[in-house]
Image (tube, rainbow, N blue to C red):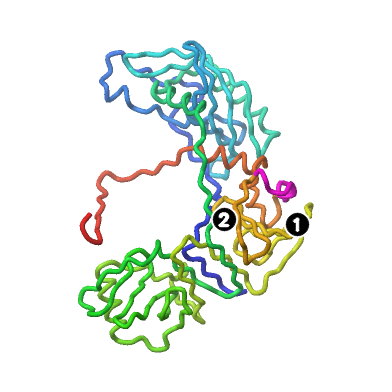
Amino acid sequence: MNKRLLLGSVFVAAAAAHLVAPVALAQTGAATAPSATAAPAQASAQPSWPRTFKLGDNQIQFYQPQALSWDGTRLTARAAFAVGPEGGAPNYGVATLSANAVSDDSTGRVRLSAVQVSSVDLPMAPAQAAAVRGALTTGLASATFDLLASDVRASITASGGTITPVQNPVPRIVFTNALSVLVPVSGDPVWQPVPGAAGFQRALNTQALLLQDVAGTYHLQAAGTWYEATALSGPWIATAEVPPDVTAAAKAANAVRQADPLLPQDGKPITPPPALLVSTVPTELIQTDGAAQLVPVAGTSLVTMDNADHAVFVDPANGETYVLISGRWFKAPGTSGPWSFVPGDRLPADFARISPKDPKANALISVPGTPQAKEAAIAATIPQMSVVPSSMTATTTYDGAP
């Protein structure tokens, strides 16, 4: 099988999160209530989340509830949770609950107690939902915990707000069966003279090393090879012998700002040199390992491009080709376009019938209404945190005045 190099394309990778060790909170323990005379800095401190509960050999991590309504006495909310073995890949769900809620203006907090879990939705493991609800009901029944009043108000406002429509511009979509490298440039090249290399300019708005000499010829280094062309659109030809002035200009340019060599993960040059596609507009490069191979998708009338590096489907009913790019669907009469955006709820019904065991099953995350899509939506609401040492420093460099 040929090696593939996917550079410059944007992907959404659905990686399984892992449960961390239980936080230092008792299963039914109450959060410590702040003193009425606490300093403002203490009052603004965030409570510890998530809470951890046991469920047989598994554990449940229960994340901070998001308020839906509050009448001054009783609060309703939804809370995401993850359930699975410690250190293993969890299933994600959401619980709907209600609780007594008392506001303390002196601390800026709302204390919840007498929590009742009214429902649990666990899309990928519905048979486990009742057990999870039971564990949460037991764990939360005698617990009290605080939420910041500002969080409660913001959550209620957001739950009743309108959703701003997302723009879905159609990128340039290029299919190829040849090993290729995509070099994106953010618009027309922004050129800057290379210090110490007379006659050479460097494009600032690309991660690759793109140079132009005094004669107007372009020189680009990618995948361990130098290429040259008389136009950005190509054709790009591998340079048999790199001129000394190009080598010197590249060294001078990299001394100012190191370019991305566009090498594969192993850091080794690709041989033979791949084809080059330079684009100044948003572009997605879809590669097949040789000629496209179409195979049926079990349980559906769809066929899929089995040897493509993207999820590509064809609906024989209308001959349309569908491709998934960064969680969005686009369709065209064929791989050469023209392409148009397709809302997920307007996909052919057979997309929802793709088996979770199918090689292209990752596409189910982007098919509304499927358990995979529901779980992904829940997982997206769970905050991801990283610890950054206070001693860490950052150095900022500018191309010109900031």
Foreground residue among 268 and 19: 268
CA–CA distance between discs 2 and 1? Answer: 21 Å
- Residue 109 in percent (x, y) is at 38, 19
Quadrant holding the N terminus: bottom right
Residue beneath disc 1: 318
Q: 10 Å neighbourhood of mark 1: few (<14), some, or many (≥20)?
A: few
Q: Is residue 353 above or below residue 321?
A: above
Q: Is residue 88 left or right of residue 215?
A: right
Q: Which of 292 and 32 is in front in this view?
A: 292
**128 on left or right of 139:** right
Quarter of the image with the C terminus is bottom left
Report the residue at 56% width, 30% height from top: 54
Q: Position of residue 121 (x, y in %)?
A: 64, 31
Left of 299 or right of it: where is 25?
Answer: left
Q: The magenta stretch spans which residues?
A: 345-354
Secondary structure mostly seen in magenta is helix
- Which three-letter amino acid code belongs to the residue tagged 2? Ile
Rendered residue at 27%/77% (across/down): 200
User: In the picture shown, does residue 53 fall above or below 241?
Assistant: above
Queried whether the magenta region covers residue 127, the answer comes back as no
| Magenta run includes residue 352 | yes
- Look at mark 2 in the image and give the residue it sits on: 325
Q: In this view, does 135 lie above or below 401?
A: above
